[in-house]
Image (cartoon, grey):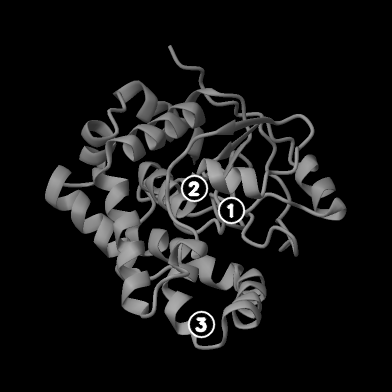
Amino acid sequence: MLPSPSDTVPSPPELPELGSVDNLRDVAGSGEGYPTRDGGRVRRGVFYRANLLRPDDDDLALLTGLGLRVVHDLRRADEVAAHPDRELPGAEWRHVDVLGVAADDALGFTTPEESRRMMEAVYRDFVHRPSVRDALARVLRDLASDPLPQLFHCTAGKDRTGWVAVLLLHLAGVEEPTIRADYLLSNERTAASRARYERMIVEGLGEQMLPVLEPVLVVTDDYLDLALGEVAATYSDLDGYLRDGLGLPDDVLDALRERLVAA
């Protein structure tokens, strides 16, 4: 039997936007949490999402104050080696390789179309690549059973992290337009870090590379629609994908819903 969620997890104050971890967010959204189809709310202070976890000292203090128990790093091994997470006191760090891409993977490209095709492959992998499905299943199992609160992240916190958040919000019963808006919010939240990376591109590679690499730096409706279309074609819907694609049994899915939804 999986542990039931703790109803004593305090509802935290609103998270400020952190300069050093600019895509840190509560999966539940802000305020009272995202509404669900049955009149509930997604419970805040349970699951957090983020981009690269290298906070400065001030932001480290805020992150420590969240009381995180587990941090799931969804990046590739080479990404972790190049930019390891900063240790968060009290949190167990776990590496779960969900593959994905980095902007550096597109350095040899000469057209935006090449970068876009690479990103589309990432979203197809969420649905079709067995190792990626296994990694996603492991993350969701741990989110369902390990001590709360927990955080998951990748490099920009937009694709691998974004897909996990889509699955969680779907399980909670959040309406699709809200899930989509939350997914696209990464473009707004990562504006500062994306601007820094764009300056590095211009300085190191030349201004002509900005449009070539832009598809790697953002999320789009098209990326999400591609993944959801592959899910529909292969598993009928996200419920089928979670059950048959990721192999998650009912007790895990029920435990996640119980943790996610506040009546």
Relative horizontal placement of residue 53, taking residue 222 as reference (left or right): right
The 10 Å Cα crowd at callout 3, few under 14, some 14 to 19, many 20 or more, is some
Query: Disc 3 on helix, strand or loop?
Result: helix
Q: Please give the residue where the numbered disc 1 appears in the rendered image.
A: 32
Which residue is rendered at x = 14% and y = 46% of the image?
234
**Which amino acid does the dot numbered 2 rest on?**
Arg
Give residue 188's position: percent from left, percent from top.
56, 73
* Badge 2 or badge 3: first in the primary sequence: 2
- Vertical position of residue 231 compared to residue 68: above or below: below
* Badge 1 or badge 3: first in the primary sequence: 1
Q: Mark 2–mark 1 contact, CB under 8 Å? A: yes
**Which amino acid does the dot numbered 1 rest on?**
Glu
Tell me the number on the disc at residue 210: 3
Q: Please give the residue where the numbered disc 2 appears in the rendered image.
A: 41
Q: Mark 1–mark 3 contact, CB under 8 Å? A: no
The 10 Å Cα crowd at callout 2, few under 14, some 14 to 19, many 20 or more, is many
C-alpha span from label 2 to label 3: 40 Å
C-alpha span from label 2 to label 1: 7 Å
In this orientation, which residue lies closer to the viewer: 69 or 84?
Answer: 84
In this orientation, which residue lies closer to the viewer: 168 or 205?
Answer: 205
**Which amino acid does the dot numbered 3 rest on?**
Leu
